[in-house]
Each structure stands twice: as C-alpha cells, then as structure tokens.
C-alpha cells in the first residue's frame, strides 16, 4: 500500500486528490492548520472521515512538518498548501512569501533529511509567467517567467528551489505548472465561484448585484478533478520533470459572466458593476497554456470543457439555494460576496 502526505489537504485540490488516492488504495495523510473553524469537519473533506489521517501542522513550523513526515513515512509528498489568493497577496505580501516560499523550503528541508527516498510534488502556478506570452499566444514550460504579484514571486521561488533540490541532491522533486482550475469546491472569493454563486443568488432574489474588478483579463480555466489526475501522473513518471497543465482555451471574465447569467436566464450587463477594490495593483491580463508536452508524455486529456465546468458549478449553487442543501442555505442568505 502506497502512502501519501498532502499539505493543504482541506483545500479544493487537496480534497479531490485525497479522493483519487484513496480510490487507488493509498494510505492518505493530510496536514491541517489549527484554526477556530473545525477543519476536520470541512465540507470538502468531512465526508472522507476516518479514511484520512489528519495531523495538525504548519508550513512555518518545521518541527510540526518533521513530526508529520515521520508519522506518515510517505512515498509521495504533495505540497498544495499556500496563501493562494493573488489580490490578497498584495495586502499581506510578507505572510504570502513566508507561507509559499519559506514554507515550501521548510518542507523541502524536512523531506531531504527525513524522507529523501520519497517523491515530492510542488503546486507551481501559471501566475509565475506574469505577462510573458510566446509569439503564438500561449505560455509553455519554456516561456520566460516574470511574475507580477507577491503571490507569483513567492511561487517562482518555490518552483526554482524544487528544481535546485532535484539537481543538487538528486531528489525526485517535480513541479506541476497549473493554470486556473475550479470546481464547486472553489473558495467563493475566486472569480468563477464568486460569479456563479452571486448569479444564482440574484436569480433567487437573495442578492441584487455582482461587484467585480477587471472584466477584461483572460484565464485558461479547467476542472480541479482533471488537474489532480495530472499531479498524480507527474509524480509517478519514470523521470522527474516540470510540466504545464492547461486546457489551451481562454476566456475573459466578461465571457464568464455572459455564459453564467445567460444560462440562468439573465443579462449580466444589468447586474454586474465594477469596483476598484477588486482590481489588482498590477494585473496578469492573459493566460492560455500549451500543455502539449504533458499530453504527449502522459496521454492526459481533460474531461471537462469550460461550459461543463460552469454547468456543474451552477447546478451546485442551485441545489444549495433551492434548499436541496439546507445546511448551506442558512449561510448563503447572510453571505456577502467577497
Ligand atoms: N478574485 C477575483 N477576481 C476578479 C474579480 N473581478 C475580476 N477578477 C479577475 O479574475 C481573474 C481571475 O482571478 P482569480 O479567480 O482570483 O484567480 P487568479 O488570480 O488567476 O489566480 C488563481 O489561479 C492561479 C493560476 O494561474 C493560481 O495559482 C492562484 O492560486 C489562483 O487559484 C483575475 O484577472 C482577476 O483580476 C473579483 O471580484 N474577484
């Protein structure tokens, strides 16, 4: 039986990855940060119950990482924990860099000392490219990286350290350079879930308008479930390497709004307003990933289209609002869009 250790296990990707690994017979260990909300009952992983081995720990507390590493004795380590919100990284740059850069380095050091035979996956990000685009309009593994946010800078440090440890210490440490990936489990202050959730609220007269920032940036959005399959493929390859995972399609925030509101029988132009507080001091305006190296190497194809992804998210929020999910309805009534 293989053993996996996941940081960020209670997040969107951590929950889907746990389900995938459990379905393949893995023993799955997860690290959760102590907070006043009972993490073990998180709606994302709560249903996995006793199947998951959860331990308290924090990327900024090396001793806790060492304890978890010894307990889990993993074959595979997935570092999915981070301060992952790009705009918020401008408000809390030092915490973002501590968690995403120093936290990753703390984990790498514990890995090198305690479990060097294991394999290590780092959640790297398309935000590392900043506004670099190849002449054909895509970003790929060879595209220069020029991050434009504290989050992107912290992720570029992590990406570089993983490559450095791989080469210096002959460790099986790899990066997945993942473009945006979403699902009903996405935090509702990321744009896809914010748009879908608020549009459903508007349809049911629980909200009056949707306040957004920049409507003219473009993103390459896939489904988290497809992308965690990719993480598992990369870490199980015969050679360590770094791969872009993306759909290859791009849409603006405006197109996202148009699709979601139209599906709900509304015109987004009547409800969407812009507010500077959701703008970023510097914006990454265009992402479109070329994952052909990854696809050729592993035979991966995404199962979800942009439309199928959004349809699933709409169905999720409709179920919540229509009372088919009573527990979440109470929270939704009082929820303000973030
Ligand atoms: N969050 C948010 N974004 C908005 C809003 N209005 C417009 N946007 C625009 O919507 C785009 C996507 O924003 P997010 O959904 O917050 O995602 P992101 O900044 O692209 O970052 C996500 O993807 C990265 C991969 O490229 C991840 O690494 C990162 O952790 C995060 O998941 C950005 O151009 C942002 O300016 C708003 O009200 N909220």
Image (cartoon, grey):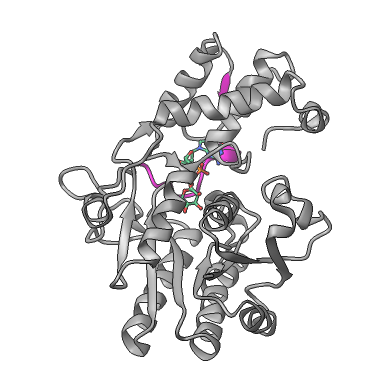
Q: Which residue corresponds to the image point at 38% horizontal and 37% vertical from the top-left?
A: 303
- Of residues 334 and 121, the one nearer the viewer is 121
Q: Is residue 269 above or below residue 213?
A: above
Q: Position of residue 10 (x, y in %)?
A: 66, 55
- Of residues 131 and 249, the one nearer the viewer is 249
Image quadrant holding the N terminus, namely bottom right
Would residue 320 be counted in the magenta stretch?
A: no
Q: How many marks?
A: 0
- Of residues 147 and 47, the one nearer the viewer is 47
Would residue 283 be counted in the magenta stretch?
A: yes
Image quadrant holding the C terminus, namely top right
Residue 275 shows in the view: no
Q: Is residue 197 above or below residue 183?
A: above
Spot the residue most to the top.
265
- Of residues 244 and 47, the one nearer the viewer is 47
Q: Give the residues drawn in magenta, as a range.
A: 272-286
Q: Which residue corresponds to the image point at 71% horizontal and 20% vertical from the top-left?
A: 207
Q: Position of residue 174 (x, y in %)?
A: 38, 70
Q: Which residue corresponds to the image point at 43% horizontal and 52% vertical from the top-left?
A: 229
């Amino acid at each position: 039986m293989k053993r996996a250790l996941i940081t960020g296990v209670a997040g969107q990707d951590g929950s889907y990855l746990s389900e995938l690994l459990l379905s393949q017979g893995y023993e799955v260990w997860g690290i959760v940060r102590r907070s006043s909300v009972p993490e073990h009952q998180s709606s994302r992983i709560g249903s996995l119950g006793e199947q998951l081995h959860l331990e308290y720990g924090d990327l900024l507390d090396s001793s806790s990482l060492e304890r978890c590493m010894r307990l889990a004795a993993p074959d595979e380590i997935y570092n999915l924990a981070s301060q992952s919100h790009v705009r918020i990284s401008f408000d809390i740059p030092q915490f973002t860099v501590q968690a995403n850069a120093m936290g990753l380095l703390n984990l790498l050091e514990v890995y090198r000392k305690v479990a060097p035979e294991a394999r290590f996956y780092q959640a790297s990000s398309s935000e590392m490219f900043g506004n670099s685009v190849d002449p054909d309009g895509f970003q790929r593994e060879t595209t220069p990286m020029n991050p434009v946010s504290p989050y992107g800078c912290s992720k570029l440090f992590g990406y570089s350290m993983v490559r450095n440890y791989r080469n210096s210490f002959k460790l099986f440490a790899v990066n997945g350079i993942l473009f945006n990936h979403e699902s009903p489990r996405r935090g509702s202050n990321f744009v896809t879930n914010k748009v879908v959730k608020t549009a459903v609220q508007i349809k049911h007269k629980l909200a009056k308008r949707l306040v957004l920032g920049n409507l003219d940036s473009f993103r390459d959005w896939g489904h988290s479930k497809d992308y965690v399959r990719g993480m598992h493929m990369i870490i199980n390859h015969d050679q360590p390497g770094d791969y872009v995972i993306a759909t290859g399609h791009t849409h603006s925030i405006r197109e996202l709004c148009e699709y979601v509101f139209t599906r709900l029988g509304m015109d987004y132009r009547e409800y969407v307003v812009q507010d500077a507080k959701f703008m970023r001091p510097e914006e990454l305006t265009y992402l479109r990933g070329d994952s052909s190296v990854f696809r050729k190497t592993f035979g991966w194809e995404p199962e979800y289209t942009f439309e199928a992804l959004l349809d699933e998210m709409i169905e999720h929020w409709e179920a919540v609002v229509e009372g088919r999910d009573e527990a979440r309805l109470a929270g939704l009534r009082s929820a303000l869009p973030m």
